Amino acid sequence: MTETEIPEDHPRYASLVTRHRIEAGVEKGITSKQGLIAQGRGEAFDYLLGERTLPSADAAARAAAAALRLADHPVISVNGNVAALAPSETVDFAEAVGADLEVNLFNHTDERVRRIADHLRDHGADEVKGLAGDGEIPGLDHARGVVDADGIESADVVVVPLEDGDRAAALDAMGKTEIVIDLNPGSRSPRTADVPIIDNLLRAVPNVTDHARDLADATPAELERIVDEFDPDAALDAAEAAIRDGSFADEADETDAE
Ligand code: ATP
């Protein structure tokens, strides 16, 4: 079944489209097989969150947009899942906040970096970093720490959607402001982030982009206030509470019960 053949009125439409994109990403050599496992894990958490953007995640998205507006050199890290799921949205995001795009893979091969860079260019990106590999994230073995010197290595703010916990901690140790998008509030990467956005990448990326456009005329003082008022621990707690206290009964069930 292709993406266009999935019936839009299917109750699991969004989930089926997402699975299809990841599967197509693996077939194109963009996404690794481990990416399929990450997808399954994310989907389970999204189910528990009610497949919606929590108010706390929206506040995180606004804080992320403010931090990116204040940044001197923001970089958005793109892996195989991000490229397969939201290429146009990610390119639009980078443009809205004036960030570089850098392909950064846990299972690095030059071939896959090239394919992802081509895929992003097919979706409107001008320059895509990640192939120079002349920089490093200290504290990691070479294969996992390789980055571009004029990209992630010299960035002040990095957006790392779906990042591995070790690398998130190593980036934090470099003193970078880290924005993590991840559906699991218990994962190490959002727990080390300055701004953890506990939401599906497919909702979070366009949402941060909208906030960034909305904040285009905000003064530095206003942006700093938004960043300072954001509390990462409270955002993680709110997501955890939504998962633990949630109910599978949706509004329709509740109406039926009345
Ligand atoms: P960590 O090392 O940070 O503890 P992990 O081992 O829990 O991470 P991985 O399996 O390395 O996680 O990576 C998958 C992560 O990506 C999961 O936390 C999952 O919730 C998240 N994820 C998968 N798909 C999405 C998506 N579409 N949007 C947001 N997060 C996602």
Image: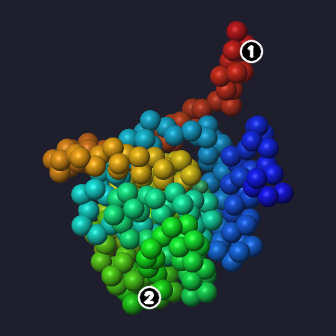
Question: Which image quarter: residue 34?
Answer: bottom right
Residue ID for mark 1: 256
Seen as rendered, the residue at the extreme left is 221
Q: Is residue 150 left or right of residue 37?
A: left
**Residue occupying the point 54% across, 54% down:** 201
Q: Where residue 198 sits: x, y (%)?
A: 49, 48
Q: Compared to 38, does 116 lie above or below?
A: below
Q: Compared to 248, does 88 lie above or below?
A: below
Mark 1 vs 2, N-terminal side = 2
Label 1 packing within 10 angstroms: few (<14), some (14-19), many (20+): few
Query: For disc 2, does the CB lie below 8 Å from ligand 1?
Result: no
**Residue occupying the point 69% across, 26% down:** 249
Query: For disc 1, does the CB lie below 8 Å from ligand 1?
Result: no
Q: Is residue 185 left or right of residue 23?
A: left
Seen as rendered, the residue at the extreme right is 1
Numbered mark located on residue 133 in the image = 2
User: How far separated are the C-alphas under marks 1 and 2?
Assistant: 58 Å
Q: Is residue 226 left or right of residue 246?
A: left
**Residue occupying the point 48% across, 53% down:** 205
**Residue occupying the point 48% across, 50% down:** 206
The answer to whether residue 235 is visible is no
Numbered mark located on residue 24 in the image = none
Question: Disc 1 or disc 2, which is closer to the eye?
Answer: 2
Secondary element under disc 2, as helix, strand or loop, is loop
The answer to whether residue 16 is visible is yes
Question: Which image quarter: residue 117?
Answer: bottom right
Type of residue at label 2?
A: Gly
Q: Where residue 209 sits: x, y (%)?
A: 42, 51
Which quadrant, please, contains the N terminus?
Answer: bottom right
Q: Nearer the viewer, residue 246 or 43?
A: 43
Which quadrant, please, contains the C terminus?
Answer: top right
